[in-house]
Image (spheres, rainbow, N blue to C red):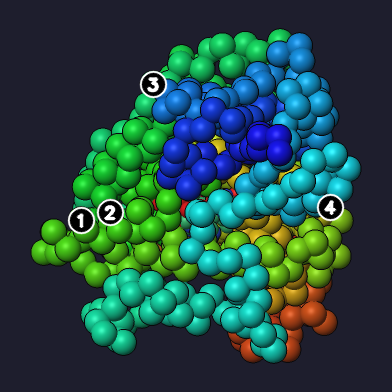
């Protein structure tokens, strides 16, 4: 019998060094990683995102080689690179006479389909293997909520806490409460100084040169000699340590806060390391819990619970939602929104100080934290009636951590309510009042956060009421928004007219706000 000689594919977000594949080097097994136009071009990505992915993939390939594994690495400009997974795999199988093709299960529906289709055409046996990264299986959330109309994150989260015995006191939540969300909503009051962040100085000049030479369309800024994102496991572990030592003690308190003075506040900036699978979610949770146990006098329960909820709860929940609702999710548009994405999303050039800050830092650092994504850029896009396809493309391109399995449920379901409320119980929209209470953006804004109409009235205010007015049929029966209709109905008819007129003018002039 001829010797088994498999070719194993590793995608750019599958850099899990601790996967059982890599336990023992085997000279008959070859791994392949590839930088391909198929992936650089399916949306317009931030330049830092492409550079960070390629740098992390190159470092991973190098690490495997050091450990004695055989690796084929196709750079973007390698002449033999055919620029799609299918063409490269087909070529390699033919040229090197591999006997089997094996791949790690992709997390995106698009790639899942593509690889399954490819498998049908290949002349060798094909096997798909788990990535050994997530804490739930693809279909588990669907099974957990079988027969239910809504997928409530809180019940899923409690189940995960019990299942993994995290922050539990026998069968009760540690501290007596499952959730300290009420204590996670403080504006930044400068009472705690933001610690010195750990940024890396990764030199990705070569990669950037190739991206430019190959004319890959990108957005955003980069300092090629100083990419701040972690691209190796050692750097990712250092970032984790810096977070649990210095940032965790105030993480929960200021989780929803926004300030023009600082773009990351107490957030971990671990999403790239997590989403590329360089770090495992359980090791991140365990590191945080260990730090909390060691310094429980300094780290209150709401800090650690707030952090655990994001990873054990939200992250796994979003993945489950993705596999439950795909492929339909990618076409949902509950409000039938059709407007184009305002041009300032690509430039940050707007008089709205909150948008300028959130978009500006996204272009500069490929990063905005959750509340900026949800309550500034997402909120505005929903109020302005932007087509969710355009909103998705923007989020999928601009963020360092954007991969469809996590971007789409967050954007389309959570932020744009395009699923009609299967995930969120009400649309995440607000007037200027919320942004004013959670940030200092309004202090420096040319718009007046208190005005609904008239000279320099904040656009969020009139668009907010206009949204409720336009979508009355779809929303007024929702018990969580009924009160807003009662307020609107009580408003003087002249005032209502002025608000709607203002909103109409803003929507017409949306590119120049
Ligand atoms: C419209 C919109 C789009 C988003 N797109 C993405 C995306 O493409 N990729 C992505 O990883 N996250 C996305 N998120 C979730 C969240 O904003 C980011 O995970 C977070 O900002 C990453 O920064 P951080 O690592 O500093 O997070 P921290 O605030 O430090 O949180 C720790 C970790 O918790 C996880 N987490 C927190 N919130 C969520 C959430 N809602 N869903 C999934 N995981 C979560 C992340 O892994 C994160 O690294 C999106 C949120 C919104 C509202
Ligand atoms: S006034 Fe309005 S536009 Fe300006 S920062 Fe506040 S919420 Fe944003």
Crowding at dot 4, Cα within 10 Å, few <14 / some 14-19 / many 20+, comes out as some
| SS for callout 2 | helix
Q: Is residue 471 above or below residue 303?
A: below
| SS for callout 1 | helix
Residue under the image location 48 percent in, 63 percent down: 135
Q: Nearer the viewer, mark 4 or mark 1?
A: 1
**Mark 1 Cβ and ligand 1 under 8 Å apart:** no
Residue under the image location 72 percent in, 31 percent down: 98
Asked if marks 1 and 2 touch (Cβ < 8 Å), the reply is: yes
Image quadrant where residue 324 sits: bottom right
Q: Nearer the viewer, mark 1 or mark 3?
A: 1
Q: Work out how far the residue at label 4 is from the one at label 2, CA to CA, in angstroms.
A: 44 Å
Residue under the image location 59 percent in, 55 percent down: 130
- Residue 339, labelled with which disc? 4
Most extreme residue toward the front is: 1
Q: Nearer the viewer, mark 4 or mark 3?
A: 3
Q: Is residue 233 above or below residue 476?
A: above
Q: Work out how far the residue at label 4 is from the one at label 1, CA to CA, in angstroms.
A: 47 Å
N-terminal of the pair, mark 1 or mark 3, is 3
The residue labelled by disc 2 is 287
Q: Is residue 257 above or below residue 495?
A: above
- Residue 201, labelled with which disc? 3
The residue labelled by disc 1 is 291
Image quadrant where residue 83 sits: top right
N-terminal of the pair, mark 4 or mark 2, is 2
């Amino acid at each position: 019998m001829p010797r088994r000689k498999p070719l194993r594919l590793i995608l750019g977000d599958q850099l899990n060094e601790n996967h059982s594949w890599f336990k023992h080097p085997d000279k008959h097994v070859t791994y392949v990683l590839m930088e391909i136009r198929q992936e650089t071009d399916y949306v317009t990505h931030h330049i830092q995102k492409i550079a960070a992915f390629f740098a992390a993939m190159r470092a991973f390939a190098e690490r495997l080689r050091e450990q004695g594994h055989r690796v084929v690495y196709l750079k973007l400009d390698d002449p033999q690179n055919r620029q799609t997974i299918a063409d490269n795999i087909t070529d390699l199988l033919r040229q090197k006479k591999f006997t089997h093709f094996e791949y790690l299960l992709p997390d995106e529906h698009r790639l899942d389909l593509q690889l399954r289709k490819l498998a049908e055409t290949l002349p060798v046996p094909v096997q798909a293997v788990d990535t050994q990264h997530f804490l739930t299986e693809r279909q588990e959330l669907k099974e957990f909520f079988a027969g239910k109309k809504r997928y409530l994150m809180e019940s899923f989260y409690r189940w995960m806490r019990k299942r993994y015995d995290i922050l539990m006191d026998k069968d009760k939540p540690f501290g007596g409460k499952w959730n300290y969300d009420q204590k996670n909503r403080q504006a930044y009051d400068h009472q705690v100084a933001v610690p010195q962040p750990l940024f890396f100085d990764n030199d990705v000049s070569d990669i950037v040169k190739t991206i430019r030479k190959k004319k890959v369309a990108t957005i955003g800024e980069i300092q090629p000699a100083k990419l701040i994102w972690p691209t190796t496991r050692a750097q990712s572990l250092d970032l984790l340590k810096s977070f649990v030592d210095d940032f965790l003690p105030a993480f929960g308190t200021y989780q929803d806060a926004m300030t023009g003075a600082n773009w990351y506040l107490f957030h971990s900036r671990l999403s790239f390391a997590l989403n590329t699978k360089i770090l495992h979610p359980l090791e991140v949770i365990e590191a945080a819990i260990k730090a909390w146990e060691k310094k429980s006098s300094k780290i209150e329960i709401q800090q650690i619970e707030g952090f655990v909820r994001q990873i054990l709860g939200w992250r796994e929940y979003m993945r489950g939602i993705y596999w439950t609702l795909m492929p339909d999710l990618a076409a949902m548009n509950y409000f039938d929104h059709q407007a184009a994405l305002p041009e300032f999303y690509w430039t940050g050039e707007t008089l709205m100080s909150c948008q300028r800050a959130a978009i500006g830092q996204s272009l500069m650092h490929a990063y905005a934290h959750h509340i900026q994504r949800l309550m500034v850029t997402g909120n505005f896009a929903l109020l302005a009636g932007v087509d969710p396809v355009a909103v998705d493309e923007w989020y999928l391109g601009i963020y360092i951590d954007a991969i469809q399995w996590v971007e789409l449920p967050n954007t389309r379901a959570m932020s744009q309510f395009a699923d009609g409320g299967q995930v969120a119980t009400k649309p995440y929209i607000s007037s200027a009042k919320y942004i004013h209470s959670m940030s200092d953006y309004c202090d420096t804004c040319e718009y007046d956060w208190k005005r609904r109409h008239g000279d320099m009235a904040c656009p969020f205010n009139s668009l907010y009421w206009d949204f409720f007015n336009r979508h009355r049929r779809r929303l007024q029966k929702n018990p969580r928004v009924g009160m807003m209709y009662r307020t609107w109905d009580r408003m003087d008819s002249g005032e209502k007219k002025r608000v709607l007129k203002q909103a109409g003018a803003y929507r017409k002039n949306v590119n120049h706000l």
